[in-house]
Amino acid sequence: MLGFPAQLARAWNCAPKWCRVIDEEELLEGLNPAQREAVLHRGSPLLVIAGAGSGKTRVLTRRIAHLVYKGEVRSSSILAITFTNKAADEMRSRLVEMLGDEAKYMWMSTFHSACVRILRSHADRFGYSRSFTIYDTQDSRRLVEQIEKELNIDPKKIRPQAIMREIGAAKSEMVDFESYREHASGPFETKVSEVYSLYQQRLKQFSAMDFDDLLMVTVNLFEACPDVLDMYRDRFKHILVDEYQDTNQVQNRLVLMLGEVHRNVCVVGDADQSIYMFRGADVRNILEFEKAFPDVKVIALEQNYRSTKTILDTANAVISNNRSRIPKNLWTSSDAGPPIFRYRASDENDEARFVGREIKRLADQEALFYSDMAVFYRTNAQSRALEEALVIEGIPYKVIGSTRFYDRREVKDLLAYLMVVANPADEISARRIINSPKRGVGDVTLAKLAEYARASGISLVDSFPYATEAGAPKKAAIALAELSSIVSELAQMNDSGVGPAQLLSAVLDRTGYRESIKALEAREAQSRMENIAELVSMAGRFGELQDMLETVALVSDADDLYGIEGKVSLMTIHIAKGLEFEVVFMVGMDDGVFPHMRSIDDPVQLEEERRLCYVGITRSKRWLYLTHAWERMLWGAYNNSIPSRFISEIPDELVRDL
Ligand code: ATP
Ligand code: MG
């Protein structure tokens, strides 16, 4: 039977006719009283603040389902924010199970994706083209390098990465280049301010935005165009955010701006799991939320449903060493389960072999699937030894997020062609296609061409046919004219509705790129051709070029979690946030590795490392292994190491040595 209000709502025809849930109770089933209260609360902003595995994500999902089911809001009027695209997809598919196909159309995404959607409709109101390009870290870095060159800044003295970090930090606090310049002090900041201002100028000229811009420009757009803000305030009648502890100031501002009027804002988070301080995440946003909405309803969830008592006691013991935290009372009714297993390896290879053997044993003796098991480490470089050991044991595995598929050279080369087609102003991509494949256009010619383009007020791509006028040698001019005609041809194909897969094939055929790959050493050629084939097949899933480029641009490391069925997952702890596994191995539990060397002497950073450790431990449902090595190859040399201080924070009676 339908609940009465839903029946009524349906009778009024504003109801979700497609709802699959047959009973409201079914929606509330499997929720404890506090969770239920969070799902049912109405009338004021809601903050659910609770420890790991206490059902925050579950509550958020059910709350959305409940709102829609009751006919209180249409699914298209909900904005739900998750930390990764993968998490958004999972939440969406759970809602489709509960509610039916209508749930497919909810705005459920990361902050970045939501902002891109908004900007695609309105960026022109703020001086950008709507078909702007999104630059990834590699593209931004190229631009910074180019600017350093132009400004005669020695990249060895001020590394591009350092500049990018500084600009990123500024943007995550909404500091634009003008305010940065005003407050810059000392030689480093002065140089950064010069780069920052030219960098922004160029991005605008290229009609491109970097990752941080997606957020910052959206806020700027809302500030500059109140009608646009009003439209979205009106549209999103409910705003819900998962993992709120990891929002930065800009993201927080977006939430507050959009929710200010109707105040139907629900955020869930755990201050103990805040692990992105280095990216500007600010756990104070949780406290500020209470200030921004004084009538906020705060609900604490205290029961953990994920882990055994031993794992929870371990996590609680470790995190209680952080001073700057509000203590929580997280408990479980689960059994004690197995102890925490500690393995003291002689070196990283011994450690890896142990992990391999143990995975095999668990699969055989405990009848666990490989996909129930995960190995976590602090930094990506630690995966190498593990991979070797797993190969020897014949264990299928996947390394998550180490090298992004879209960062590979051939993939980026081909994508650059598509990016130029989608946005001819994009100079970073134009520079990339000039010499891929090699066309004999040197740096000097390129500089002349760029200068010519700038002086004539045209884009770099549009300057290709004028290479001779720009002072290019004959051979280069011919090559550039040829490239120009290929680009025009591709643009025509795109205009006539040819999809991205066919465009890619045309690039491969017309530019000689395929031949240039075939000319490589056989094994390398094969692996690159495989990547190209994968890219073409991926492109085949899209009808529109813009859609494809957007998806590619917004893929994050954690989205690599697709396709892990039947495999052991290897990943950094940062990526593991929000996930759960029956078995977790945390390797490299040595002081200097985890906590990371950089953090040891800084109490604030050390607390962040401890939170990271808490996140790692609480991913495990039942089996947790902590391993350290007495000697480890680190940064190219063997070092003696001592066990991580985090291990010694665990009560002895919970730990068993293997
Ligand atoms: P994290 O802090 O790691 O993000 P979380 O608080 O979001 O965790 P969930 O992932 O929602 O927690 O839930 C953890 C696990 O507990 C999931 O497997 C979920 O299905 C289960 N769970 C949550 N609430 C209940 C409940 N009331 N009864 C049974 N299982 C529950
Ligand atoms: Mg969660």
Image (spheres, rainbow, N blue to C red):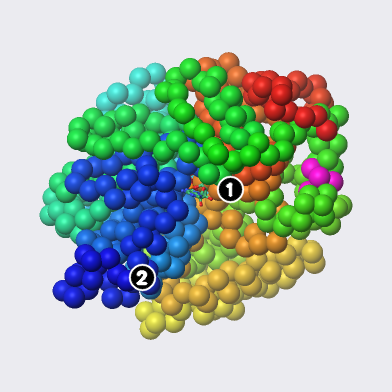
Callout 1 amino acid: Glu
- Indicate left or right for 94 with 627 as reference: left
Q: Which mark is residue 516?
A: none
Image vertical order of residue 387 relative to residue 129, above or below? above
> To which quarter of the image does residue 344 belong?
top right
> To which quarter of the image does residue 300 belong?
top left
Q: Camera-side residue: 348 or 224?
A: 348
Magenta-colored stretch includes residue 358: yes
Question: Which residue in the structure is indicated by mark 1?
Answer: 580
Q: Camera-side residue: 250 or 298?
A: 298
Query: x%, y% of residue 319?
Result: 54, 25
- Indicate left or right for 308 with 634 as reference: left
**For mark 2, does the 10 Å Cα neighbourhood hold few (<14), some (14 to 19), or many (20 or more) residues?**
some
The answer to whether any part of residue 629 appears in the image is: yes
- Indicate left or right for 20 with 644 as reference: left
Report the quarter where the C terminus lies.
Answer: top right
Magenta-colored stretch includes residue 196: no
Task: Magenta stretch: give its range.
Answer: 355-359
Residue at 58% over, 24% down: 317
Callout 2 amino acid: Ile
Report the quarter where the N terminus lies.
Answer: bottom left
**Ligand 1 has an atom within 8 Å of the beta carbon of the residue at disc 1:** yes
Residue at 26% over, 38% down: 297
Q: Camera-side residue: 97 or 187?
A: 97
Question: Which residue in the structure is indicated by mark 2?
Answer: 22
> SS for tag 1?
loop
Q: Are marks 2 and 1 in contact (CB under 8 Å)?
A: no
